[in-house]
Amino acid sequence: MLDNFAQINLPNLELQPEYKFLDLPQFNRPEMLNCVEKLLDNHIKEGRGNNICIRTFEETWTYQDLYEKANQIAHVLVDELGLQSGNRVLLRSANNPMMVACWYAVLKAGGIVVATMPLLRSKELTTIIDCAEISHAICDSELAEEMNLVHSDFLKKVSFFRNADLEEKMVSKPKTFQNNHSKADSVALIGFTSGTTGLPKMTAHYHKDILNICEAFPQYSLQPTQNDVFIGSPPLGFTFGLGGLVLFPMYFGASTFLIEKPSPDLLLKAIQDYKVTICFTAPTAWRIITTKVDEFDISSLRKCVSAGETLPLKVWQDWYDATGLKIIDGIGATEMLHIFISSNEENMKPGATGVAITGYEAKIIDANGNEVSRNEPGRLAVKGITGCKYLNREDKQREYVEKGWNITGDVFRQDEEGYFYFVARGDDMIISSGYNIAAIEVESVLLTHEDILECAVVGLPDEERGMLVCAHIVLKESEKANDNFKTQIQNWFKNAAAPYKYPRIINFVESLPKTETGKIQRFKLK
C-alpha cells in the first residue's frame, strides 16, 4: 500500500517555482533514488564502516553502528508498527545519535520524516500531526510527557527510545535492510515553518533535494573532507541544523559532534577536546562565544558558519579580531531547505551576506516584480536547485512563488559587485513619520555601544508617528539600568547614526526571548 498524501497535496506544477542548474553534473540525479544510500549505506559498501560518524561527550558511533541501528529501526517501523510507504513519521528528540538513526530509518522504510524541536508542547505537536496527517511518532523518552498529552485521530503508533520499547524491539531485528525504492522526486521530509499566527505551513522536499544541497553550500563555502569534524547548536528539527550536523558531514564521510543542550561553554569545550573543524551556530551565540574564546584552545577550527538571522558586522569583526577566523554568513529558508546566498574566504565582504552560491541565482525586485537598481532595497527573489513546495496551501504558495521566483520575505540590496546585503525582514521594517527604518540597522548601531550586550528592536504603533522605534536592551552590567542611562544611550545614538532612527522607547531587560536555534523572537516583543 502507498500513502500518497504528500504527492496529492503538492502544489500544481504551474504554481511551483522554476528550477535551475539541475542539468549540471553534480545536481543531475537518477530517476530512482533513496538519499540514504549516498549519505550512509555507501560508506559501508566502500569500506568506511569503521570510521567515526557521530560523537557526543558520552559515546562514539562509527558509520557501521549508525547503519546497523538505522536498519534495525527500519525493521521495527515496518514489521512491528506497520509503516507503509509515504506515511509521515514525527521525530521528537534533542540532537543525539538515536535521533539520527531514526531519521535514516524512516527514509529507509519509505516514510516521510517530520522532525520537530524538543521544546514544542502537546498543542503544537497536535497541530503538526493533524496538518500532516501523521500516523507514527518516535520520541525520546525524556520528552515523553508532552508526547503523551497529544490526542489526534491520525496518530496510530508511538514508540519511545532511551531505555524504552524501541530498543527492546530492535534487539531481535536484522542489521541489514532492503531500502525502499524511492524516486528522486519522492517527498523525503516535511519541514514546518515557524509562523507566528495561523496554521503552520508544510514545506516538502524530495530525496534529490537533500543530496543536491550537499553539493551547493558545503562545496562552495566549506570544502569539507573526511577529516572534518562538524559541530553546532541548531536542532536537527531545523533544516539549518539538519544540513550542518547530519547531511553535510555524512555526504562527505566526515564526522559530527552532537550536544543535546548546546551552550557556548560546551561548544567551546568540544571544539577544544575533540579537535572540531567546522562550527554552525547563530549570531547571538557567536557574540557570546567571542567573550569566552580566550579560555579554550580552538586552534583546530577552520570554518565558522552563521545563519538563522542576519550577522551584525560588529559580531563578525569582534570574532575576527579575537581569533583571526572569518564567520561565513548565509541566508537560507525552510522553503529552500538550506543556504542559497553566502560567501567563502576568497569572496567575503564584511557586512555582506554574500552572493548567490553555486546552484542558485538571486535578484532584488520591487512590488511589481521588476528588478531594481543596484544599492536600492527591495524584495529578495531566488531560484535554483530547490524551491518552495507548500503542501495543501495554494494561497501561501501563490504568495511565496511569483513568476517562477521564490520570494523569501526579506528586504535586501545588491551592490555594484553583486554582493547582497540584508536590510530587514519584510515585516521588520519600521515606518515612522514617513521614514523607513530597518530594525536590524538600529540594532547594529546599538551593538557597538560598549555597555550593550544584546538588543532587539521592534516597531510599536503610535498615533502621531505611525510607529515608534523601540529597543529592548540587555546590558553587560544590569545595575546601570535606569532612566538616566536610557537618555544617555539615546543621545549617543543620535551622534552615531541618523537621529530619526534613534530608539524613542528603551526597555532594559535581563534576557531576550529566543527560539531553540538562537533566533530572537521579535514578535514577542511587539
Image (cartoon, rainbow, N blue to C red):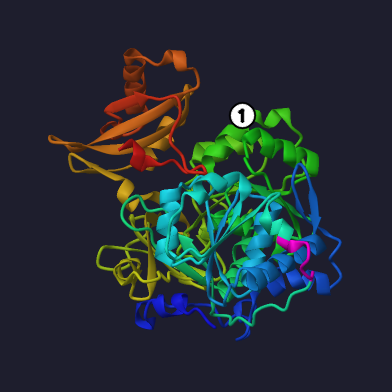
**Magenta stretch holds residue 274:** no
Q: Is residue 73 left or right of residue 342?
A: right
**Magenta stretch holds residue 174:** yes
Instruction: Answer whether residue 222 is visible to the viewer in this image.
Output: no
Name the residue rendered at 40%, 76% in the picture.
9
Residue kind at label 1, given as amino acid type: Thr
Pick the quarter of the image with the C terminus: top left
Pick the quarter of the image with the N terminus: bottom right
Helix, strand or loop status at disc 1: helix
* Label 1: few (<14), some (14–19) or many (≥20) C-alpha neighbours in 10 Å: few
* Residue sitting nearer the eye, 242 or 168: 168
Name the residue rendered at 58%, 32% in the picture.
288
Name the residue rendered at 25%, 63% in the picture.
367
Q: Position of residue 174 (x, y in %)?
A: 79, 71
Q: Position of residue 448 (x, y in %)?
A: 46, 30
The image shows residue 104, relative to residue 97, as above or below, that is below
Q: Magenta stretch mostly in which secondary structure?
A: loop
Name the residue rendered at 47%, 80% in the picture.
4
* Residue to which mark 1 is pinned: 291
- The range drawn in magenta is 169-175
